[in-house]
Image (tube, rainbow, N blue to C red):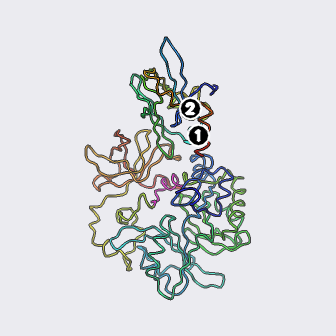
């Protein structure tokens, strides 16, 4: 794919003008870094990081029955979501394989009318839209807001204070996984206490035409406390330390939620596509998602094979140098008998077997 | 160090060729352009001293946070020295890619591969085109 055909977020011009090294990420031209992955990572852990996550898909559903529709498509019960609440869940195929991991929001507009909002991985936008459209009842309207809006994640110990400067009304009252409509720099938008870094913070959704002014205001405020714009590179190291799964790595159509360590995202007391298949699977035989810490300086990368003796017992799904821990870490799937904490597993690093130890997830938890 | 008399490989290694006791010795490193692109360096695997290497083949590895990259031998010959201080001082490569940043010295056995290397101007042009 050439650069000309890549989709651009409303913040593209800012990234390009401010040192963003742009790469193709699932068809979007996105900044992988501005200065250095380690600097941007540390800025987020210590102060605040700003992330353009406008490439993620945003869907709105209006009409009675929208939450019930989604309830039947996700592993987590959402039909009972109170207004202002957000829930993480997995969309599965009939056979239990994961189509995507998504957030479902129950929101209210200024007139108090309920609607449903959904955030979907950028690379799964068309797939999930088609999956939903094929099942859309007549009384529910589906609108794709991805390109009409921008989404900015503000993450880190200073995130709430920075975001508050732009938003009318006290956002500290929002609890984790709550969201609401908000006036952001005098314009309508959404604020939710969500994120993908292991830090506290919010994600702001604003009309595309306001994206640059909101971003610049956040950037000025962030810079005063040592914050930084953060690219996809540090977004990946942050979420890896926080052990958050990434679609295409820890999650895929070939992986079921049962092995991904996402028990919290399953509610068995409602009907959803894939439930029958998932109930029939012998859970104890499935590979298990584990954390690995290398006993060496080499960095384990995606698809590196994992061995115990001469037996291949699994594969790395994500790996990186951990800027916070100062050592290489990875997540991967291993056969269940090798998943206990403390188990030594060899990582095949380009033909060399190097020892790693199974450790509990997450690697990093904020204090 | 001046980069005027250095040669560059398409794969971003730099080479300085010097005569010593009738033999041609190539000092090899990684270009400042490549160091900047790699950015957050975390690991360098040096070639083994005494190893025979072939031009165009991997003879070392460098890891950044983001990725692992091969370092390719720009010439064929025997590795006669490796910069053992470098792996513990990878950050210094950002300031000094061309002097203390050397990786290995190769006693050239066949200098035909030198013809495939570029001068600084040619290399800069290639980097500009790569974007």
The one of B85 and A16 positioned closer to us in this rendering: A16
Query: Which residues, given as a range, are shown in magenta?
Result: A235-246
A206 to the left or right of A69 = right
Q: Are marks 2 and 1 in contact (CB under 8 Å)?
A: yes
Q: Residue at x 42, y 76 (%)?
A: A73
Q: Residue at x 57, y 26 (%)?
A: B100
The one of A353 and A158 positioned closer to us in this rendering: A353
> Residue B120, position in %: x, y?
61, 31
Q: Quadrant of residue A117?
A: bottom right
Which residue is label 1 attached to?
A: B126
The reply to whether the magenta stretch includes residue B95 is no
Q: Earlier in the sequence, mark 2 or mark 1?
A: 2
Q: Quadrant of the C terminus of chain A?
A: bottom right
The chain carrying label 2 is B
- The label on residue B118 is 2
Mark 1, Cα crowd under 10 Å, few <14 / some 14-19 / many 20+, is: few
Q: Residue at x 46, y 75 (%)?
A: A130
Q: Relative to residue A5, is residue A349 depicted above or below?
A: above
């Amino acid at each position: 794919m050439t650069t000309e055909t890549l989709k651009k977020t409303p913040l593209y011009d800012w990234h390009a003008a401010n040192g963003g090294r742009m790469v193709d990420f699932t068809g979007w031209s996105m900044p992988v870094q501005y200065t250095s992955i380690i600097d941007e990572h540390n800025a987020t852990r210590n102060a605040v990081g700003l992330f353009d996550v406008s490439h993620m898909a945003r869907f709105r559903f209006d009409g009675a029955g929208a939450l019930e529709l989604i309830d039947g498509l996700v592993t987590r019960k959402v039909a009972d979501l109170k207004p202002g609440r957000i829930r993480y869940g997995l969309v599965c195929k009939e056979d239990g394989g994961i189509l995507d991991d998504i957030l479902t929001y129950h929101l209210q507009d200024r007139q108090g009318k309920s609607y449903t909002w959904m955030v979907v991985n950028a690379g799964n936008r068309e797939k999930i839209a088609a999956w939903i459209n094929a099942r859309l009842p007549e009384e529910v309207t589906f609108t794709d807001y991805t390109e009409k809006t921008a989404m900015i994640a503000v993450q880190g110990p200073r995130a709430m204070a920075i975001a508050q400067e732009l938003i009318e009304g006290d956002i500290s009252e929002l609890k984790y996984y709550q969201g609401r409509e908000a006036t952001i720099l005098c314009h309508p938008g959404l604020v939710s206490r969500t994120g993908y870094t292991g830090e506290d913070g919010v994600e702001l959704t604003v009309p595309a035409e306001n994206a640059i002014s909101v971003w610049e205001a956040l950037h000025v405020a962030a810079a005063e406390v040592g914050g930084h714009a953060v690219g996809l590179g540090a977004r990946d190291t942050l979420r890896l330390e926080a052990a958050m799964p990434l679609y295409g790595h820890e999650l895929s159509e070939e992986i079921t939620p049962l092995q991904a360590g996402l028990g919290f995202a399953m509610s068995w007391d409602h009907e959803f596509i894939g439930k029958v298949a998932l109930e029939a699977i012998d859970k104890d035989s499935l590979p298990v998602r584990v954390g690995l810490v290398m006993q060496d300086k080499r960095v384990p990368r995606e698809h590196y094979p994992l061995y115990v003796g001469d037996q291949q017992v699994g594969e790395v799904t994500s790996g990186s140098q951990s800027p916070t821990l100062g050592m290489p870490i990875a997540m991967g799937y291993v056969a269940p008998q090798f998943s206990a904490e403390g188990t030594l597993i060899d990582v095949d690093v380009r033909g060399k077997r190097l020892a790693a130890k199974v450790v509990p997830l997450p690697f990093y938890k904020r204090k | 160090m001046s980069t005027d008399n250095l040669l560059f490989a398409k794969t971003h290694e730099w080479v300085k060729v010097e005569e010593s006791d009738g033999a041609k010795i190539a000092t090899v490193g990684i270009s400042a352009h490549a160091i900047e692109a790699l950015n957050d360096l975390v690991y360098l695997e040096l070639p083994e001293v005494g190893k025979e290497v072939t031009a165009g083949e991997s003879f070392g590895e460098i890891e950044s946070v983001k990725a692992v990259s091969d370092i390719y031998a720009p010439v064929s010959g025997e590795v006669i020295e490796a910069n053992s201080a470098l792996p513990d001082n990878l950050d210094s490569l950002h300031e000094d890619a061309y002097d203390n940043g050397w990786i290995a010295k190769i006693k050239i056995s066949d200098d035909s591969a030198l013809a495939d290397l570029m001068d600084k101007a040619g290399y800069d042009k290639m980097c500009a085109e790569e974007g």
